[in-house]
Amino acid sequence: MYPALQKEIETYEKRTPQSREAHHRAVRRVPLGVASNYRYYPPYPLFVREGHGSSITDVDGNQYIDHNLCYGALMAGHCHPAVMQAVEERLRIGTLFGMPHGMELELAEEICARYPVDMVRFGNSGSEVTMHSLRLARAVTGRGKIIKMEGGYHGGHDAISVSVKPKGDQFGDPENPTPVVSSAGVLKGTTDATLVAPFNNLPGVERLFARHPGEIAAVLLEPIMMNIAFCMPDEGYLQGLLEIAHKHGALLIMDEVKTGAKLAWGGACEYFNVKPDIICLGKSIGGGFSLAAFAASREIMDVIATQKMFHAGTYNTNPVVMAAGLATFRHVLTRDAYSHVDRLNRKLVDGYQRIIGKTGLVAYSDGAGANGALLLYPQRIRNYRDWYHVDEDVWTHYWFAMVNRGVLAQPYWWDEQWTVSVQHTDKDIDYHLQVFEEVAPALATAQQERAAGAPAAVSQ
Ligand code: PMP
């Protein structure tokens, strides 16, 4: 760790003693002191007290403009009034029945109006619905194997816990990546059924189909890879994948857990004009509540309708999250809201670009819809192998320096990105850019000194 980074971390520690104390206590009972491994980072994570609109306050009383927004699950921002009102009304008349109630149909209609699908099943998390989307593809095709992209994240279940963040000494040939299991405890045979392709590389997918004729049920991918910061598909790539999958009798599953609500009114399907066979939705569709869904054509969903495929869940469509989901679709994710977040996000990306140009930082900023990121890489990344070379220390320096000045620029980890909510304002974006302008010269200096091989001096 170089001195300027060390100094930012010391400042963080001075500003957040209550978080340190809370974390110290939590590790006694909660592994790593957090409820999801992503939430831990050294020296300790911020513990949060409350959130309103576009900001949160930590347990020390520090306020931050929040672009983490629960890993992008809050395009609504915190406590959106329309969502709060809908939920408060539901709280008084029953929160859980495990019986149908009619809001399923209402929300399914909202989803079918926006995305190219006919039928919907609901769940509670992105992981659940990507898991069931794979079961659905296998049930429909009668095949076992799936293809996922190297560096793609789709949740915590075994089938996709392969090549999520594989290391350089394991991942092999970039054209033909070695499948690498990403956690202890994942069933060993998983990698027999999960094949791994490089993103933005159609011949790589063709080769897998050629090697496993008649065995592959589906290709699963995020249309914009947002678990390697922000990586756009090449022009025509998604359409090409769809063609290849269909040519070989397989389905295309688009994981729109992040893009579905945040990229555009009709998600990535609308944005890229593509009609996948199955879509997965989650995160921001719930307006701050745990709502997810998978959806497809009537023909595909028929395997559930005819009871060949089983899908269930005690908490599915509980009235509280359904009320939140309906309010979110009807009052938050409106066409006007997309114009608002698009404009603010464009201002943020362009502002970053201007500051990058001025300071000579070797980096660029990219974004679409409500999301964007700073990428510490000389040119636009096209896949996981490009992203793998991002300088973690300089990124960590960026993150802590922003946090110390009141901007939670994105979730911790350089594989994430910022979200702009409907409750962010021009004032928030102006302040964010003002802080980045203050921080960027030190990052550029650190890059130069690291490139020259000298230990970076503490910059003031
Ligand atoms: N798919 C994608 C693209 C995701 O980014 C995530 C979570 N970051 C998931 C699935 C899993 O969602 P959840 O954490 O709600 O299980």
Image (tube, rainbow, N blue to C red):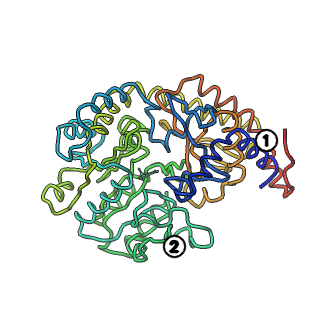
Residue 421 point in image, percent of width and height: 48, 32
Among numbered discs 1 and 2, the one appearing first in the sequence = 2
Could you tell me which residue is drawn at 59 percent across and 32 percent down? 65
Residue 82 occupies which quadrant of the picture?
top left
Front of the two marks 1 and 2: 1
The residue positioned farthest toward the left in the image shown = 306
* Residue highlighted by disc 1: 442
Q: Nearer the viewer, residue 68 or 376?
A: 68
Residue 76 point in image, percent of width and height: 43, 32
Q: Residues within 10 Å of mark 1 (few under 14, many from 20)?
A: many
Q: Is residue 31 left or right of residue 236?
A: right
Q: Amino acid at mark 2?
A: Thr
Label disc, if present, on residue 75 of the rendered structure: none
Q: Residues within 10 Å of mark 2 (few under 14, many from 20)?
A: some
Could you tell me which residue is drawn at 49 percent across and 36 percent down? 370
Q: Nearer the viewer, residue 414 or 173?
A: 414
Image quadrant holding the C terminus, namely top right
Q: CA distance from mark 1 to mark 2?
A: 38 Å
